[in-house]
Image (tube, helix red, strand yellow):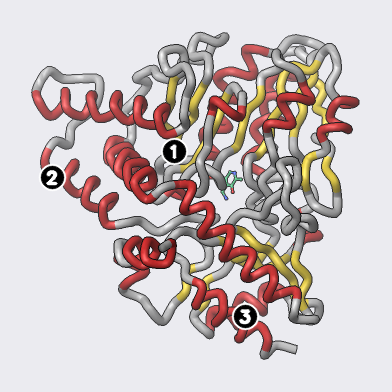
């Protein structure tokens, strides 16, 4: 049943359907776009393109309404339990989203002597903005201490028990990631809220989860969620920040502060509609199964080492599950060379240190990242090629 569902959906991606000899395995960098998204952007630009929030003619009003409606749609997609209190700000992607939270909100929220917790083994986009906020405040004479988020080194999972030791009276902010962009682990963010208590603001980097699995603000209990439209099947240069309390200090995310990326917003709305119709739960089952197929296959091949998520096959709510991302190393072949060899066989993978924070340099690896259009045959073909490399 899932197989027929996948076949019908795969056919809707022109770049995938048009290149059957290639396998795109780099969706964590950016995802391919279904025809519905391309059509929505084309329709917008050829029928009602105008600036938003200005003008009193039909196209301008329709564009203003498009932006408003997409804000509503983002809240709905994120299962926002109180949409009347929250707000959505459109950005060019997750990096700009995290910067926006840091610059427009965090710097106004912190005082001298406050502490923040930063996940130093996650994506640099979820590290640099918080350090920049600290440095900006330092120049104004406001000292903020940065505490590292504790990790379990074997599984690259957060360690909520140790986080309880890190969080103190002066902790005012915690940054976390939903799904890790190198190891693919679901970081079980609900444990973070339990560890830090009900009052400390949490910002979630959902770049690798929105569009890949059901993401619910009602369940995660975070204060900000940031995602990338382009990793969620929408256009490059689109993304959003969701803020639980729009009236928080100095954060005015819904403001009309310049010309928004209206065609990107049209594409984002179409992508969210497409994802809901496809079913994010089914997408999650599909890509998780493909990742497990690859992980299992690699474990049978002696030269390869799979990184992170050592406990991914066990069941249970607090055990880390691997989503559609698998990173691995060949014990004798450099990852750059391996990436090159794989491309000569038609596989597009990522091979470097993956924009990771502290552990990046040491974790040079090949990353395979999947989306709804990837097929089990691609994984099997990849494993056959990998098996030929001693
Ligand atoms: N956070 C994570 C976890 C990511 O994987 C990425 C993209 N690789 C980003 C942030 C940055 O996203 P964007 O490209 O939309 O700025």
Of residue 377 and residue 245, the one placed in the foreground of this image is 377
Distance from disc 2 to disc 3, alpha carbons, whole Å, reads: 45 Å
Q: Is residue 222 left or right of residue 55?
A: right
Q: Does the residue labelled 2 lie within 8 Å of ligand 1?
A: no
Residue 235 seen:
no
Q: Quadrant for the C terminus, please.
A: bottom right
Q: Residues within 10 Å of mark 3 (few under 14, many from 20)?
A: some
Q: Nearer the viewer, mark 3 or mark 1?
A: 3
Residue 259 seen:
yes
Q: In this view, does 241 lie above or below 157?
A: above
Of residue 381 and residue 356, the one placed in the foreground of this image is 381
Label 1: which residue? 239
- N-term-proximal mark, 2 vs 1: 2
- The image position of residue 381, as x and y in percent, is 54, 82
Residue 380: image quadrant is bottom right
Label annotation for residue 46: 2
Of residue 356 and residue 242, the one placed in the foreground of this image is 242
Q: In this view, does 77 lie to the left or right of 62?
A: right
Label annotation for residue 383: 3
């Amino acid at each position: 049943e899932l197989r027929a569902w996948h076949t019908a959906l795969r056919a809707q991606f022109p770049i995938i359907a048009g290149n059957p000899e290639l396998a795109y395995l780099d969706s964590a960098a950016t995802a391919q776009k279904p025809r519905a998204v391309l059509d929505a952007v084309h329709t917008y630009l050829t029928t009602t393109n105008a600036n938003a929030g200005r003008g009193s003619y039909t196209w301008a009003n329709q564009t203003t309404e498009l932006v408003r409606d997409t804000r509503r749609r983002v809240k709905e997609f994120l299962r926002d339990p109180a949409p009347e209190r929250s707000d959505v700000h459109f950005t060019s992607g997750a990096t700009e989203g995290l910067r926006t939270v840091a610059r427009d909100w965090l710097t106004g929220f912190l005082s001298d002597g406050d502490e923040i917790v930063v996940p130093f083994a996650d994506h640099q986009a979820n590290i640099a903005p918080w350090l920049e906020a600290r440095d900006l405040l330092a120049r104004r004479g406001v000292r903020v201490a940065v505490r590292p988020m504790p990790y379990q080194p074997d599984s690259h999972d957060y360690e909520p028990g140790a986080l309880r030791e890190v969080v103190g009276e002066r902790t005012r902010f915690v940054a976390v990631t939903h799904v890790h962009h190198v190891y693919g682990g679901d970081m079980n963010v609900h444990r973070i809220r339990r560890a830090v208590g009900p009052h400390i603001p949490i910002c979630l980097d959902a770049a690798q989860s929105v569009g890949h699995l059901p993401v619910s603000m009602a369940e995660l209990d975070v204060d900000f969620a940031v995602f990338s439209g382009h990793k969620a099947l929408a256009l490059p240069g689109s993304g959003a920040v969701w803020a639980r309390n729009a009236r928080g200090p100095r954060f005015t995310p819904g403001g009309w502060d310049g010309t928004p990326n209206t065609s990107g917003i049209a594409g984002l709305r179409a992508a969210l509609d497409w994802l809901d119709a496809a079913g994010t739960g089914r997408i999650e089952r599909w890509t998780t199964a493909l990742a497990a197929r690859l992980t299992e296959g690699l474990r049978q091949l002696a030269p390869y080492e799979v990184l992170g998520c050592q406990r991914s096959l066990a069941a249970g709510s607090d055990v880390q599950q691997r989503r559609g991302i698998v990173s691995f190393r060949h014990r004798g072949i450099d990852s750059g060379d391996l990436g090159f060899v794989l491309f000569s066989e038609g596989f597009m993978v990522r091979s470097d240190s993956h924009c990771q924070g502290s552990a990046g340099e040491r974790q040079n690896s090949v990353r395979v990242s999947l989306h709804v259009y990837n097929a089990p045959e691609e994984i099997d073909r990849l494993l056959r090629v990998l098996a030929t490399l001693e």
